[in-house]
Image (spheres, rainbow, N blue to C red):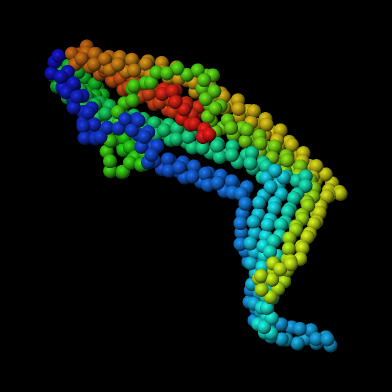
Amino acid sequence: MNKFSRLIIVLAVIVLPVCAAAQSKFSMEDVVSRALTQSPAFKLAETRKENRFWQYRYFRTNYNPQLRMSSNNAGSLYNNSFTPVRQPDGSIEYRPLNQLNPGMNFGLQQPIQWTGGMIFVNSSYNYFNNITNDTRQWNGAPFNIFVNQPLFAFNPYKWDLKIEPIRYEESKREYAESMEQISSDAVAAFFNVLQAQVNAQIAQFNLANNDTIYKIEQGRYNIGTTSQDKLLQVELQLLRSRQDVAQADLDLQTASLRLRTFIGLRSGERFDLNLPDNIPQFDVSEEEALQYARQNRAAFIAFERRKMEADQAVAQAKGERYQVGVTASYGTNNVGSTVGDLYQNPARQQMANVTFNVPLVDWGRRKALMRTAIANKRLNDYIIAQDEVTFEQEIITQVRQFEMLRLQIEITRKADEVAQERYMVAQNRYLIGKIDITNLNIALNEKDTAKRSYLEALKSFWTAYYDLRRLTLYDFANKRLLYIVEQ
C-alpha cells in the first residue's frame, strides 16, 4: 500500500468518529422512551385522556340522585318601601311597607332512565314577617313528591347509556393508539437526525478525500502527467465538498433541534445516535392482524357507536312528532306561627295534569323531519361500510409491506457493503493511475447513495413497524397486547 492510500485511510478513521467521541449515545429505543414520557405530544395525549375521563364521570352523575338546596323567596327577601294601596273611593294612598320574606327549598331529584321521566321529592319552607304591624307566619310543604313523565317521547337517558360507555372506551383505545403514533413520529425524527448525521460524516470524509486528491492532481500537473482540465475539475469538486459540509452541518443542527423539541430534551444537550440495524424477526398474517385490529382498535368500536348515533337521531325525530306528558304530585302543606306548626295536622296537596301538543296541519313538516333522519341513517350506513373496507385495506397493505421492507433492508445493506468495497478498489486504482477522476467520482457517489439508501430502508421498516402496532394495538415482536380492556 503506497503513502497516498495510507493517508486516505487515516483521514477516514479520524474524521468519521470525531463527533461521536464527544457526545452521548442514544439508541432508537431511548428516543422512543423519552418521547413517551417527556414529549409535548405525550403531555397533550395525557391531558386529552384525563379530559375524557372527567367527561365520562360527568355523564355517570346524570343517573344518580341529586340533592339540592335553593332559595324559595316569594318576591324579595327583604322589602322596606312605600307601596300604593287603592282606596274604596278609587284613590291611591302610599303606605309604608317593611317585610321580611325568606324561603328555603330542599329537593331530591332522580331521573327514570328506563322511561325518560323525573321524580322530585321536595320540602319547602317560607317565613313571612310584616315588621310594620309585627305579623309573623310560616308556610310550607313538609313533604311533596312530584313526577313528570313524557309519553311516546325520545328518551335521552336510554340512548346516552348505550352510547357514552362506548365513546369512553373508544377514547381509552385512542390514547393507546396515540402512544404508538408518538413512537412512530419519534422514530421518524430519530432517523432524520441519523440521516443528517451520516450526511455530515460523508461530507467531511469527501472533503478530506477531495483535498487529498486535489494535492495529488497538483503534483501530477506540475510534472506534466495530467491536464489543467482535470486539475480544475478536481478543484471544483473540492469547492463543492466545502459547500456540502456547510449545508450538512446546518441540516444536522436543524434536525437535532427538532428532535430535542419533540422528545423534550434540554436545548444544550449534545447527543449522537446509534444505528438500529438489529431487525426483529416475526411473522404477521393478514388474518391475525385483522383479528387484533377488530379486537383493539378505537375505529372498529366507533363503527358501532356511529350506527347507534344514527339510530338515536331517528328515534329523536320520531319522538318529536308530538308531545304528550303526564305530571302528578302528592304532598302536604300547612301554615302556622312556628315551623313546628307545619307538621301539626297538615293538609293534603294533590295535583295531576296531562299536557299535549299534537300538530293537526303542519304541511308535512314533521314527516320531512322524520324522512331526513332516516335518509341520514341510510347514508351513514353506506359511509360506515366504506370505512370498514378502508379499515381492513389499510391493515392488509401494512402487513404486505413488511416482507418487502425486510428484503429491501437486506438488499440495501449488501449494496452498501459492495459500494464501500468498490470505492476502495477504485480509490487504489486512481492512486496508481489506472482510472481517471471521473470514474473515481462515480464510485464515490455510488458509495454515498448506497449508504443513504440503507438508512432510508431502515427508516421505512421501523416506521412501518410502529404503524403496524398502532393499527392493531399488538406488539408482534414481543407477542403482547398494547391495550387490555378493563373488566
Residue 96 percent coordinates (x, y)? 69, 85
Q: Is residue 96 above or below residue 34?
A: below
The answer to whether residue 221 of the structure is visible from this angle is no
Residue 374 horizontal side relative to residue 259, left or right: right
Residue drawn where x is 76% and y is 66% of the image: 347
Residue nearer the viewer, 306 or 141:
141
Residue 259 horizontal side relative to residue 77, left or right: left
Residue drawn where x is 78% and y is 52% of the image: 326
Residue 380 percent coordinates (x, y)? 67, 34
Residue drawn where x is 80% and y is 57% of the image: 352
Residue 422 horizontal side relative to residue 125, left or right: left
Furthest toward the top, the residue is 434
Residue drawn where x is 51% and y is 34% of the image: 486
Q: Is residue 85 above or below residue 56?
A: below
Q: Is residue 52 above or below residue 394?
A: below
Give the quadrant of the N terminus: top left
Q: Quadrant of residue 167?
A: top right
Residue nearer the viewer, 1 or 298:
298
Residue 53 percent coordinates (x, y)? 52, 44
Residue 331 horizontal side relative to residue 210, left or right: right
Furthest toward the front, the residue is 344
The answer to whether residue 288 of the structure is visible from this angle is yes
Q: Quadrant of residue 127?
A: bottom right
